[in-house]
Amino acid sequence: MALRKRTRSRIYQGAVYVILAGLLLWMVLATDWKTVAEQFANPEVVAKMLPGIFTVALKNTVLFTLVAFVGGLLLGIVLALMKLSSVGPFRWIATVWIELFRGLPALMTIFAFTYMLPIALKVKVPGGPVVAGLLGLIVVSSAYMAETIRAGIQAVPKGQTEASRSLGMSPMKTMFWVVLPQGFRIIIPPMTNEFVLLLKDTSLLFIAGSTPLTKELTTFARDGLTTYASATPFVMAALLYLVVTIPLTRFVAWLERRMARER
């Protein structure tokens, strides 16, 4: 007699669990834990990395992320409005900007702002290479945020605009007091994801160089790897990235579930 579908499903699941448990047991037995501890969790290296990895690296990573996010958000709003404008040159400029900086790798954009533009334009960016690199990161984030903001604006029902105009509000007031607030409510989850991506993209600022006081997590860990000949600094940096990003991604998931229930 053929096995019932439910019985076959249970046998299949049991086989999967056995295979996974076997793989886990093999990894535990095959791993050289002494070498792992020395190379990836060396307590002496951990002690030497403290408190700098918190007071300098983590602080700078969060600070750079906030600066890039706020700058990209403000510029992204302008670009989104330009792309939705009825004025042709505004739309063309916004489209070229968005397509250019979404198409180029962020590393190349940061390199261009740090080294190429100062040479080509004969200008010196106040604050040095790190500020120039941050400007590149702002430009990249603005291109992605502009498209997200534009989608949020277009998702607002047109009846909201028509109702506001019927009350005598000007087009500008309607946009800033009615449409944008509702659009931002829609795009909170993707904007939070953009913040998480920016947090990780701050690691690209290493190409701009740094001083002992401007190092972010990745640069701090790379220098620690060279100094201590151990991968422990990279493990520490990875854990600190997760400490920041996991709560944010969980927050995004919660927001999406809540908004789905409301809809």
Image (tube, rainbow, N blue to C red):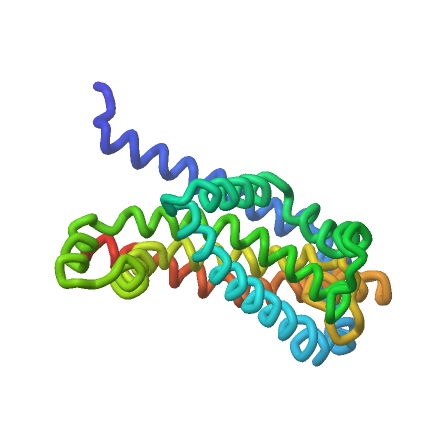
- Residue 34 appears anywhere in the view: no
| Residue 45 in the figure: left or right of residue 101 | right
Residue 166: x percent and y percent?
A: 13, 58
Of residues 135 and 246, which is closer to you in this image?
A: 135
Residue 137 sits above or below residue 44 on the image: above
Residue 3 sits above or below residue 222 on the image: above
Residue 132: x percent and y percent?
A: 71, 61
Residue at point 63%, 72% (across, down): 58
**Residue 257, picture quadrant:** bottom left
Of residues 83 and 49, which is closer to you in this image?
A: 83
Residue at point 64%, 43% (across, down): 105
Of residues 240 and 137, which is closer to you in this image?
A: 137
Residue at point 65%, 62% (across, down): 134
Of residues 204 and 240, which is closer to you in this image?
A: 204
Residue 179: x percent and y percent?
A: 27, 58
Q: Count every numbered label the image shows and give the total.
A: 0
Please identify the residue farthest to the top as the structure is shown.
1
| Residue 99 in the figure: left or right of residue 150 | right
Residue 182: x percent and y percent?
A: 27, 59
In the rendered image, the quadrant that contains the N terminus is top left
| Residue 153 in the figure: left or right of residue 260 | right
| Residue 60 in the figure: left or right of residue 261 | right
- Residue 202 appears anywhere in the view: yes
Residue 46 sits above or below residue 125 on the image: below
Residue at point 73%, 71% (across, down): 127
Residue 146 sits above or below residue 45 on the image: above
